[in-house]
Amino acid sequence: MATIVSFHAHPDDESIGTGGTLAKASAEGHRVVVVVATRGEHGEVPDGLLDPGEELAERRVKETTEAAQILGVHRLEFLDYVDSGIMGAPTNDAAGSFWRADVDEAADRVAAILAEERADIFTVYDARGVTGHPDHIQVHRVGTWAATRAGTVRLYEMTVNRDHVRALMEHTATIGLSPPDGIDLQTLGVPAAEVTTTIDVSEFLSAKRRAMAAHESQVSETSVFLALPDPVFALVWGNEWFIARGNAPIHEGTLFGGMGDAGRVC
């Protein structure tokens, strides 16, 4: 079996972007490791949700731990950088923000995890961070450099098939489905032609939905992420997309093609 390390910017990104892939990998017997750069300190939170004296970062770590258990994650690590907030916000320049982190230093920390785990597969985000969020872009920068330093066998960039999502939004407009606030369908992810690997996660949608719901402070039951009938939820979340980079061969339906019995690349 193989080891997959999945690098994310904030709590909940692991469930929304790669939850199905991670659950599928775990169910197939692979070792699954999740690394999260920040604790999501600057996420919005509904009034009254936090317990007295509870910080949002504390809650979000608890939520991620629960989501990781649902997805079958074997190891969860936080790098403890500070959430940078949306692009252009004053928090981008705050002390300790991930956006301002030294890329070499951060890459060394991630590379150490990759080397310790003898990672076969490493996932980051595409060059624009899928949505343009500064911390997502930094995951790409730090992660790609870490993969080079660690000599990780296969690097995949998690992305979104923009053409698929735009067509889906047109198809589902009659039920009022719209993208989350702040998501621009003109720049989200990449065109279909740039996607190399599409993972069918339809058999793991229950785990993905429960993992997303575990992030109660950020993903409400009435949000576009969860408030969908099962058939529509399957249309929206039934596939996860990646771009193979470097010496990662294109295997259209899996990240694990060509693996030998011991999990290393044949």
Image (cartoon, rainbow, N blue to C red):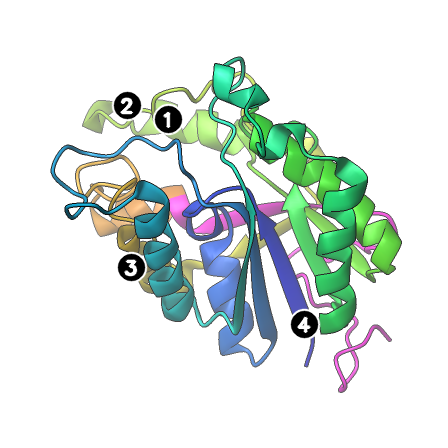
Q: Secondary structure at mark 2?
A: helix
In the image, which residues are magenta?
237-266
Question: Circle 1 is placed at which residue position?
Answer: 169
Using the image as rendered, state which of residue 137 and residue 43 is in the foreground.
43
Q: Looking at the image, is mark 3 or mark 2 nearer the viewer? A: 3
- Disc on the earlier residue, 3 or 2: 2
Three-letter residue code for mark 4: Thr
- 10 Å neighbourhood of mark 3: few (<14), some, or many (≥20)? some
**The quadrant where residue 211 appears:** bottom left
Q: Looking at the image, is mark 4 or mark 2 nearer the viewer? A: 4
Q: Which mark is residue 173?
A: 2
Q: Looking at the image, is mark 4 or mark 1 nearer the viewer? A: 4
Using the image as rendered, state which of residue 134 and residue 93 is in the foreground.
93
Question: Circle 4 is placed at which residue position?
Answer: 3
> Which residue is drawn at the image coordinates 29% and 59% (left, top)?
210
Using the image as rendered, state which of residue 67 and residue 244 is in the foreground.
67
Q: Which mark is residue 210?
A: 3
Distance from label 4 to label 1 (Cα)? Answer: 35 Å
Q: Is residue 120 left or right of residue 97?
A: right
Q: Residue 122: x and y, percent?
A: 70, 57
Using the image as rendered, state which of residue 131 and residue 51 is in the foreground.
51
**The quadrant where residue 191 appears:** top right
- Disc on the earlier residue, 4 or 1: 4
> Which residue is drawn at the image coordinates 65% and 40% (left, top)?
139
